Amino acid sequence: MKVELVPGVYWVGAIDWTLRDFHGYLTEAGSTYNAYLIVDDKIALVDTVKKGFLPEMLARIAEIVAPEKIDYIICNHVEMDHSGELTEMVHRVNPEKIFCSPRGKADLTRHFKEDWPFEEVRTGSELSLGRYHLVFLETPMLHWPDSMMTYLKEEQLLFSSDAFGAHYASGERFADQLPDCPEGYLYQLKKYYANILMPMGSLITQLFKKIEELGWTFKMIAPDHGLIYRNPEWPLSAYQKWAAGVPEAKGLVIYDTMWHSTEMLARALLEGLMDAGVETRLFHLRSTHYSDIVTEVLEAGLLLLGSPTLNNGIFPSMGQFLTYLKGLRPKNKAAMAFGSFGWSGQAVSLINKELEDMRLRVVHEGFAVKYIPDPEELARARALGTRLAQEHLRG
Ligand SMILES: Cc1cc2nc3c(=O)[nH]c(=O)nc-3n(C[C@H](O)[C@H](O)[C@H](O)COP(=O)(O)O)c2cc1C
């Protein structure tokens, strides 16, 4: 089935229905590797697919033109989910030119060790295909140094690379074809943003300014994963909101436990948050995948992180979570550590140190309890949850 975005522009990507782990990110809905074919006087392929998906992409291209007729390959992003089949593709197609950013050329060469006919493009460089003209926009560190986007001027169509993407396999190609869009798709868009783009909030804000300067408006946004947007206002405003990082009145309790004492504290704190009437969620670190927990972290204003002390340290799942969270550089959040211990009790202070390293606002010295909390300690934990919500999630 041919999927035509605008006259002469086709989706020719691949659908990865069974993918469940994407470099550690839980992809419960699978993914797609989107590639786009522009058929004009010159025929251009925008991005390619992950290793193993070449036959699917070639078959889709062959429904439209013989793959050998492709003149240009545009490589918006070096990462292997978009370039894994580039060597084979270049071999088959023998393109006249491969367009990429200067850093893209360096990094593609480093990946594939090939002397291909690269043509470096920069922000504002224009490529005429005939009736259509492509303009490039370098977006370094969104999310790799080489990243760029490609804009089809005449149709106000943005090939946005990984930005606005989501790991989502489906028979539909356009978000508006889903019966429950945007609500039904928003979680996957947010999950992708939280796990891949959360550290780049200020760059995304700058990107919006640059787009305004360039005078670009969008009738359609075609990312490299998931669905294409024919009415892109809602993903654009979601990105603006997440990039600004303004927290919501939402508190999360995130914990692990060996013998349930830390869990008792977690539940007491959660009750306290609920007493305050704020939105709240509780996550056990071995029940919910960390990529889903950070999705909730994105909009939360208060994080309560609990771990028992194990061998003078933090429980491993909490250590892993904090390492992952630190890399995502969360912003504008209050935080507190809690946990049960037996004798030395280092977990709370070690979590505090990580929270300080992340420059989160540590709003309490931490709630530590020896062995099993008693009713009085549980009542104090509950009251503390309420107080923290009132002080840090309201006004
Ligand atoms: C293998 C093991 C190692 C432990 N190491 C420490 C430790 O180094 N320091 C400490 O204060 N407590 C230590 N404890 C005690 C626990 O922190 C304590 O039992 C606590 O109440 C467990 O909380 P939980 O019920 O949330 O798992 C250890 C417990 C276990 C099972």
Image (cartoon, rainbow, N blue to C red):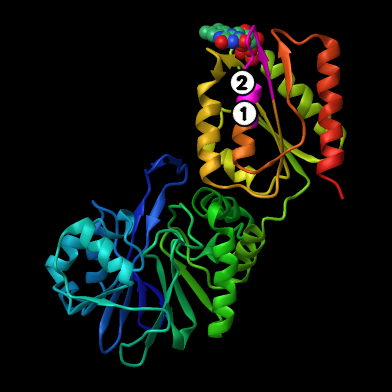
Q: Residue furthest bottom?
A: 131
Label annotation for residue 229: none
The span picked out in magenta is 338-352
Residue nearer the viewer, 5 or 73: 73
Q: Residue at x 70, y 49 (%)?
A: 332
Image quadrant of ligand 1 equals top right
Does residue 174 show up magenta in the picture? Answer: no
Label 2 crowd (10 A; few <14 / some 14-19 / many >=20): many
Whether residue 327 is visible, yes or no, is yes
User: Are the residues tagged 2 and 1 within 8 Å (C-beta)?
Assistant: yes
- Amino acid type shown at disc 2: Ala
Residue nearer the viewer, 260 or 124: 124
Image location (x, y in percent) of residue 385: 81, 30
Image location (x, y in percent) of residue 4: 39, 75
Image location (x, y in percent) of residue 393: 81, 44
Residue nearer the viewer, 273 or 55: 273
Whether residue 289 is visible, yes or no, is no
Q: Secondary structure at mark 2?
A: helix
In which quadrant of the rendered image does the N terminus lie? bottom left
Label annotation for residue 351: 1
Q: Residue at x 49, y 66 (%)?
A: 174
Q: Which residue is mark 2?
A: 347
- CA gap between label 2 and label 1 equals 6 Å
Q: Is residue 113 placed above or below 45 in the rendered structure?
A: above
- Residue 261 placement: quadrant: top right
Image location (x, y in percent) of residue 282: 68, 31
- Amino acid type shown at disc 1: Ile
Ligand 1 within 8 Å of the CB at mark 2: yes
Q: Is residue 361 placed above or below 68 in the rendered structure?
A: above
Q: Is residue 288 left or right of residue 348?
A: left
Q: Secondary structure at mark 1?
A: helix
